[in-house]
Amino acid sequence: MLSIDNLDVSIGNINILKSVTFKVSKFSSIIGRNGAGKTTLIRAIMSILPNDSGNIKFKDTVLTDIKTFEMSKIGIGYMPEDRRLITDLSVKDNILIPLWTLSLKKNDINYELEKILAFIPEIKEFLFRDAFQLSGGQQKLVSLARAMIVGKNLLLLDEPFEGVAPALAERLVELISELNELNMVTMITESDESFSKKINAEIIRIERGQII
């Protein structure tokens, strides 16, 4: 279970999140307009942004004690809203980046990659292209794959449907729905409920930095 308790987060002198408290036991969607605090919330969970007060725990681990690059070691994967691929690296290398912190053997790395490609088989078509050659929608798939390759326990997907063509959005719905059948906790963010209803996520609403 992911547990957020009385979380306050500021950027500069502006208080973005105010006494945010909720729990995610399986599959939840944080719904809020642009600027409501969704991305700030995920970045706080990932220790990209420091919290002013409050607690963030996953199972028995206090995440505020964990550095961002160590999240992969406890099975947490993160898909940023803007994808954040390294454009001059191949798709394959972009997917494998989180595994580089785990010191896995080559056979184990190949095994993890094959599992991801079995889940998202269309990536095989452009696996060896540089990331800058991909469309925005294809980059979303790669970003999801990169998050999944280490996100065995907790997966954080920030606006996964934003800015993609309708056909690809439906494919993402299909993939994310399948995540619900795996033994992991998944939290996504979305501006409205259009896709969250299709994936049967528990709805948690955020407005002006507060859960409502």
Image (cartoon, rainbow, N blue to C red):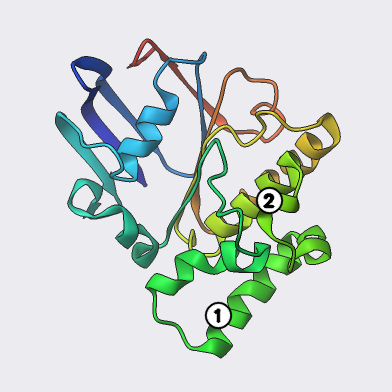
Q: Quadrant of residue 24?
A: top left
Classify residue 13 as left or right of residue 186: left
Q: Horizontally, is 210 left or right of 167 in the view?
A: left
Q: Secondary structure at mark 1?
A: helix
Judge left or right: residue 139 versus residue 23. Answer: right
Q: Earlier in the sequence, mark 1 or mark 2?
A: 1
Q: How many marks?
A: 2
Image marks 1 and 2: residues in contact by CB distance under 8 Å: no
Farthest left residue? 53
- At mark 2, the secondary structure is helix
Residue 147 visible, this orientation: yes
Residue furthest to the front:
88
Residue 31 drawn at (x, y percent): 52, 21
In percent of the image, x 51 and y 15: which residue is there? 34
Q: Which is in the foreground here, disc 1 or disc 2?
A: 2
41 versus 153 height, above or below = above
x and y percentages locating residue 154 in the rendered image: 44, 52
Specify whether residue 181 is in view.
Answer: no
Which residue was labeled with disc 2? 132
Q: Residue at x 79, y 66 (%)?
A: 124
| Residue visible at 28% across and 23% down in the picture | 20
Task: Classify mark 1: residues with Cα within 10 Å, few (<14), some (14-19) or many (20+).
Answer: some
Give how far across and how far down residue 8 sits, in percent: 21, 24
Type of residue at label 2? Answer: Phe
- Specify the amino acid type for callout 1: Ile
Quadrant containing the C terminus in the rendered view? top left
Q: Residue 152: which disc?
A: none
Q: CA distance from mark 1 to mark 2?
A: 24 Å
According to the picture, the residue beneath numbered tag 1 turns out to be 109
